[in-house]
Image (cartoon, rainbow, N blue to C red):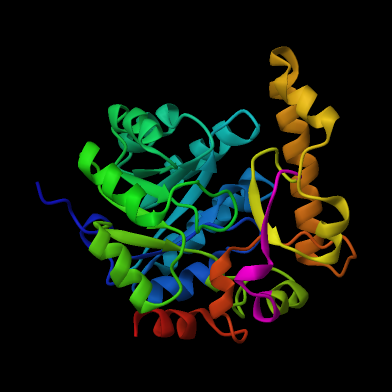
Amino acid sequence: MQKPTLQEILNIKHPIIMAPMFLVSNVAMSIAGMKKGVAACIPALNYRTLEELRAACKQLKAAKTDNGAFGFNLIVSKSNPKFEGQLEVICEEGADFIITSLGSPKTTILAAHKVGIKVFCDVVNLEHAKKVEVLKADALIAVNNEAGGHRGNIAPQKLIQELNENTSLPVISAGGVATKKDIDKMLSYGAVGVSVGSLFIASTESSVSEAYKQACVDYNADDIVMTEKISGTPCTVINTPYVQKIGTKESWLENLLNKNKSLKKWVKMIRFSIGMNAVTKAANSATYKTVWVAGPSISHTKAILPVAKIIDKLIK
């Protein structure tokens, strides 16, 4: 059976989602993306309060274009104590889609579908995909081993084809896309669209510091390493001197606490909070503690550019 394209699912011009990036994504970036005919997604955690999230929803609705779309990313695990309030606000205000990460999307799918919001679910393997298919997700975000941030372990072609052959859901590929050639390659594997993140860190509209943006210009794929030190879940970062100093592996104590069933939930919440605070400080100010999240596609970032120009390069 022919699966709908991302353009058909979201009524957009190009098969591209500007991936939700912690601290990076914002309303200005999203509006610029919608004007170019792509879908834009912002992490709900980028807003400290529910009032700020509600205001962003209203701004995006007011600025929505005929061939663009917007959505929000929700961390649906217990590490996010704001989840229920964030879901309620998004469902009340409206959005085109929600992307769920790091947990069961059951509650999100039930609430979002009641108000006509589509739900796409991050998955890293077929086991996860089968679970969200049963829950009636609208599409899969196939997070492969070339993605930035929290990534999977399976190569793009293998993951896309495995999900296509064994589920009925459309597959949106996340990771390893920096050029039109990359988009065409993912579509040839069977993806209906792509999610692109790291290219947009060094955009003029991005919320992070000029130092973070310039790092994406100066560093390349060889400088990306995986760390277990931020949120408790492996995450890709730029291998700055500070990252080299603190190392990328869990300490024996962190490992021990993570294995304790009675403490695991609280340990994850605390580590997530501490890790995100460290990333926030590094992203927004000059600090020697530079923990900059990015993926290997920063090799294609040669200058800090407006979102519109980055998209032009990506589709041409």
Image point 70% across, 38% down: which residue?
232
Q: Residue 78 falls in which quadrant of the image?
A: top right
* Rendered position, 119 above or below 300: above
Q: Residue furthest left?
A: 1
Whether residue 282 is visible to the viewer of this picture, yes or no, is yes
* Rendered position, 297 above or below 61: below
Out of 197 and 237, give the one closest to the viewer: 237
Residues shaded magenta: 216-229
Is residue 227 found inside the magenta-colored segment of the image?
yes
Residue 284 at x, y percent in the picture: 78, 65
Image point 71% across, 30% down: which residue?
268
Q: Residue 35 falls in which quadrant of the image?
A: bottom left
Is residue 77 found inside the magenta-colored segment of the image?
no
Side of 195 relative to 8 (left or right): right
Side of 262 relative to 42 (left or right): right
Q: How many marks?
A: 0
Image point 53% across, 79% down: which residue?
300
Image point 76% across, 40% down: which residue?
273
Indicate the quadrant containing the C terminus: top left, top right, bottom left or bottom right.
bottom left
